[in-house]
Image (spheres, rainbow, N blue to C red):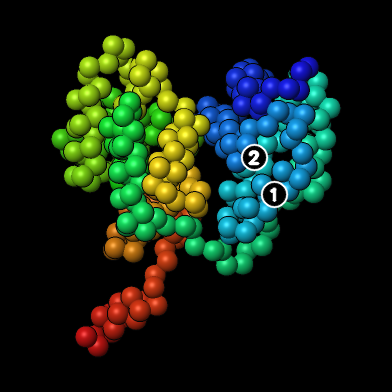
Amino acid sequence: MSQDKPLTEYLDGFASYMESSTRLLPVTRQRYRYEVSAFAALIGNPPLRDTTPRMLLDWNARFHQSGAAASTVIQKHSALRKFFGYLEEFEESGQAGRLLNVLRMQMQAPKSKGPVRPAYVLEEDRLDRLLDAAGSKLSTGIRDRAMLHFLYSTGVRNFELTGLEMKGLDLRERMATVLGKGDKERAVVFDEACQQELEQWLATRKSMRHPSDYVFCSVDGTRLSTAAVQGIVRDANKRAGFRKQIWPHVFRHTRITKLLNNGMSLQDTAVMAGHTDVKTTMRYYHQEPSRLKEEYDKATGRL
């Protein structure tokens, strides 16, 4: 096989392989494709022949340094192992085999159950600047601003956003039905500001030549890919003048953390986030010591 193609050009074949030759659920296949795309974007999407073990080691170190949960890293490792395994076997790539060996032998997911660093949460002013930057793009600004606002307001995952269909959106009630992990549907709520952004986008969307079943679609009516959403977030971040890279999942971190810290119950937050275990939700709860003392005094009647 030619190893001159950028990594992302193998994604369609990888997706076909997963669908025809594995028992992975559709949501898992989509997640694996997203993780490979994110990896490629992070290292500059080089040709396969120029993808080195050093790049894999740097990629792995990034998640250890950020304090990512072991389950998150395991999922990312699994996606790359499946991808390079596909390239080694079906595309007969020796380079992919070498990279696969690195993943198998040198990069074990973290096993420590020690404290995990808090997930990065967007500051209020940075969020506003990101939304403004997304909206400044002439061709797709109205859509992109509404999309980022929806990500933040609901805390949905990237693939849940791209899969949102018009029939699942209720503007009047400010609710949407998304398809989450394990192909499980759940309802999410968005705020009034997001409602207004969506109304503007849907009014603009009506003038499109090509109808679409999906709320957030391309100009030709097709469903956006998770990689496209990542690109929109990256572009907005750049336009806003920020150097620190962010991913769509940061909007989810921010929303879940704020819901918990502003008093929404752990159980209700877990339902909205699509977490089957409240322990997962608890990772997003980061109470400031001063606030903790205030709540303690209220509970003990000292105020």
* Residue for badge 2: 43
Which kind of residue does numbered mark 1 sit on?
A: Asp
Amino acid type assigned to the residue bearing label 2 in the image? Ile
Is residue 302 visible in this depiction of the protein? Answer: yes
Q: Which residue is rendered at x = 72% and y = 43% of the image? A: 55
**Label 1 or label 2, whichever comes before in sequence order:** 2
- Residue drawn at (30%, 14%), measured in percent from left and top? 211
Q: Is residue 22 shown left or right of residue 190?
A: right
Residue in front for this viewpoint, 294 or 45:
45
Residue 40 is left or right of residue 205, and the answer is right
Do labels 1 and 2 touch, CB within 8 Å? Answer: yes
Question: Against 244, is 12 above or below?
Answer: above
275 relative position to 20: left or right: left
**Tally of numbered tags:** 2
Q: Which mark is residue 58?
A: 1
Q: The N terminus appears in which quarter of the rendering?
A: top right
Q: Quadrant of residue 287?
A: bottom left
Q: Answer few, some or many: residues within 10 Å of disc 1's Cα (few below 14, many 20 plus, some between 14 and 19).
A: few
Seen in the picture, residue 153 relative to 91 is either above or below; the reply is: below
Q: Secondary structure at mark 1?
A: helix
Q: Residue furthest bottom?
A: 302
x and y percent of residue 16 in the render? 61, 18
